């Protein structure tokens, strides 16, 4: 199958994102809010167990929340 055939076949099924464009701000803001809360909880009790249960999820939430906020407010078409 050539690249042109793949391109034509993909045009029949357009990409549908999981989070629609009009709700990305809401999702990103909530992810950042939960990340700030988790970061505060991690700051109260800095242990190895707390790192695995609160610190790493806070970092992941901050990363995804930042990307959603950039997509929501930083990209103009």
Image (spheres, rainbow, N blue to C red):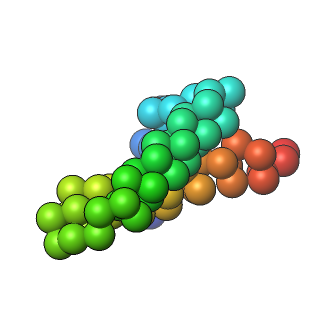
Front-lying residue, 54 or 11: 54
Whether residue 2 sits left or right of residue 17 in the image: it is left
Whether residue 71 sits left or right of residue 54 in the image: it is right
Residue found 40% across the figure and 64% down from its top: 43
Whether residue 30 sits left or right of residue 22 in the image: it is left
The image shows residue 16, relative to residue 28, as above or below, that is above
Front-lying residue, 33 or 9: 33
Residue found 54% across the figure and 43% down from its top: 33
Front-lying residue, 2 or 17: 17
Q: In which quarter of the image is the N terminus?
A: bottom left
Front-lying residue, 18 or 61: 61
The x and y percentages for residue 40 are 45, 55
Q: Quadrant of the C terminus?
A: top right
Number of numbered markers: 0
Rendered image quadrant of residue 10: top left
The x and y percentages for residue 67 are 58, 55
The reply to whether residue 77 is in sight is: yes
Whether residue 39 sits left or right of residue 77 in the image: it is left
Residue found 29% across the figure and 56% down from its top: 54
Residue found 45% across the figure and 33% down from its top: 18
Q: Which residue lies furthest to the left in this view?
A: 49
The reply to whether residue 11 is in sight is: no
The x and y percentages for residue 57 are 32, 56
Q: Which residue lies furthest to the front in this view?
A: 44
The x and y percentages for residue 3 are 44, 63
């Amino acid at each position: 199958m050539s690249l042109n055939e793949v391109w034509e076949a993909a045009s029949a099924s357009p990409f549908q994102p999981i989070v629609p464009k009009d709700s990305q701000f809401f999702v990103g803001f909530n992810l950042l809010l939960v990340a700030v809360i988790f970061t505060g909880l991690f700051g109260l009790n800095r242990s190895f167990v707390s790192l695995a249960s609160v610190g790493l999820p806070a970092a992941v939430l901050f990363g995804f929340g930042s990307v959603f906020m950039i997509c929501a407010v930083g990209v103009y078409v």
